[in-house]
Amino acid sequence: MRVAWKVNESCNPEQVRKGQAPDMVGFQEIGCHLVFDIKMDLTRKARFVAGGHTTEAPISATYSSVVSRDSIRLAFLIASLHDVDILSCDLENAYLNAKCREKIWFEGGVECSEDAGKVLVLVRALYGLKSAGASWRSELAQSLQDLGYESTKADPDVWVRKAVKSDGYEYYEMLFVYVDDIISVSHRVKDCIEEITAFYRAKEGSIKEPDIYLGADVARFQLPDGREAWSTSPRTYVRNAIEVVERLFEEDGEGYSLKSKVKNPFPTGYRPELDVTDELGPELATRFMQLIGILRWAVELGRIDIFQEVSVLSQYQANPRLGHLEAAYHIFAYLKKHLDWGRLVYDGKTPDINESHFNSKADWTEFYGDVVEELPPNMPEPRGKLVTISAFVDANHAGNVVTRRSHTGILIFVQNAPIIWYSKRQNTVESATFGSELVAARTCKDLIVALRYKLRMFGVAIDGPANVFCDNRGVVKNLSIPESTLLKKHNSINYHAVREAVAAGIMRVGKEDGETNLSDLLTKTVSSQKRWDLCWHFMW
C-alpha cells in the first residue's frame, strides 16, 4: 500500500505554525483521525481520515461525478441485449492511488507510530480531503484512456471501447464506474477486469458477478421462454429498512408497531394536503426526513409501486405533521406486507408494438417543414442490435385539492426493461385535464430526448421514434393528427414542443386505455387490485 504522507525532517510543528519553515509556506494544517464502522453486511471497517472540512479548496479541484442510476440499469439491459457477461470489482484503498492536489500537512499522532509528533505532508489523496474524490477520478480516467476506453459525453463515468465477438458481432464493451466500484460489460469481462487490476489492486473476493450493487440485489433471472436476463431487486434493502424502523419503535418505548393488514401504501382516503394534525418537533421532523430518504432510495432500486405516495409525502419535509409521519410508517407497513415485490428484469427482447395505436401516415411537413431529429455530432458509430423505446404518460388533473396542481407520472422502457420512472407535482395549475396531460407529455418528451442522446453516446442504435402511450383522447389527437388545432392558447408552448418532436421522428403518440396505462400508478393512489394489475407488467 502506498504511504499517504512523507516526513519533513527539516522542521517541527511549532516552527511551521509560527511561519519559520520556508519550504512549508502555503501549506494548510489539518487534523486527522481514525473512523470505525460496521457495514450493512456486518463487516468491520477502520479508516484513517483527514479533516478536510477545515481546508479551503477551489470547486474545480473538488468536483467528482459518479455513474447515474439509469446508466446502471442500461448496463444490465445492454448485457442482455448483446448476450455478454457482467463482472464487478471493488478497488482497494482507491483514493491512495492518486496524488494529493492540496498543500496539506498535519502533526503525526500515536496512530502514526514512529512518525508521531513530526511534520507530515500529505502526498496521497487521503480520505476526507475535499479534493480526494476528484484526484482519484482523474487518476482512474487516465488509466482507462491508456487502455483504449473513451468516456461518454452523456455520462462521463461510462466508458466504451470497440469490441468484436468470435462470431463477428460488433458492439461496445463498457465500464460503469461508481468511485471505486466498477462494472464491466463484455464477452471477455475477466480480461477487462484484469487490465484494470494491473494498475490497481482489487479487494479480496470482489471480482465476481455482481450480487449487490448500490444497495440492490443483482441476479440472473430466467424468463418464461427460457431466456436469461439480468435483474435487480430492492428486497434486502427494504428488509433492512423495515428493521431500522422497528428498532426506532423499540427505542421510543411507546409500544408502536407496523400494521399487519395493509393493502395500499396510504391509508384509505388519506390526503396529505388536508392533514391538520400537530406539527412535528425537531426530533420527529428529522426522523420524517430520514424515512423519506430511505423510501426514495427504495423507489430508485425498484419499488415503483410506492413512488406516487412517496413523492406526495416528500412535499412536506419542510413542515411535516404527525399524520405525515404516520403515513410514512404506513408505507413501511405496506412494504413489509409486500416485501418480495420490486424485482426489475432487464429483458433485451424487442417488444411487440400494436401499430394500430399510431397514425403512421401523418405528414407534418406543412406545419413544421423538413424538421428532423438533431443527432449528436460527436456520437460513436452505433453497433449491435437496435433498441425500441416505449413510454407511458399520465396526469392526475388538479389532484391536490388544496393547490389544485396536477401530478405527472411517466414510465419509460428500453426494449422490455423499465429504465426511467417519474412522479412529480406539476409546477403550474392547469384549468383542464387536457392542459395537465399536455404538460405531462412535454415532460415525457424531454426525458425521451435525453434518453435517446444517452443511448446514442453509448453506441446503442435506436429503432425509430419512441412509442408514447397516453390515455387522453384529445392530447393523442392533437399530437398525432397534423391538422388538429389547439383551442387553448395558453397550452401552445407544450403543444408545439411535443408536436415538433413527433414531426422530427423523436416520438409518436398513441391512445392507451386508462385502465391499462402503466403510468396511472405514478399519478394517483389506486386500489390494491389495480396496483397489482399494473405492476405485474414490469415488476416480478
Image (spheres, grey):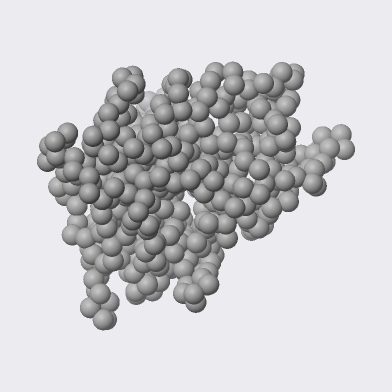
Q: Is residue 483 left or right of residue 528?
A: left
Left-right relation of 203 to 353: right
Q: Quadrant of the N terminus?
A: bottom left
Q: Is residue 449 above or below residue 403?
A: below
From the viewer's side, name the closer residue of 207 and 75. Answer: 75
Q: Is residue 517 visible?
A: yes
Compared to 1, does 408 lie above or below?
above
Q: Is residue 127 left or right of residue 57?
A: right
Q: In this rendered view, identify the residue nearer to me: 171 or 386.
A: 386
To which quarter of the image does residue 235 belong?
bottom right
In this orientation, does residue 130 appear?
Answer: no
Q: Position of residue 172 (x, y in %)?
A: 27, 65
Residue at x-position 44% and y-position 58%: 417
| Residue at far left of view | 370
Q: Position of residue 65 (x, y in %)?
A: 37, 43
- Identify the residue shown where x is 62% and y is 47%: 530
Which residue sits at x=27%, y=77%? 165
Does residue 115 lie above or below 432 as drawn?
below
**Could you tell me how many numbered marks the image carries?**
0
- Name the foreground residue: 36 vs 233: 233
At horizontal 37% and vertical 35% (from top left) the residue drawn is 475
Q: Residue furthest bottom?
A: 167
Q: Is residue 96 left or right of residue 279?
A: left
Q: Nearer the viewer, residue 232 or 276?
A: 276
Give x and y (percent) for residue 76. Answer: 42, 62
How far across and how far down the image is residue 219, in percent?
Answer: 53, 67
- Where is the C terminus found, in terms of image quarters? bottom right
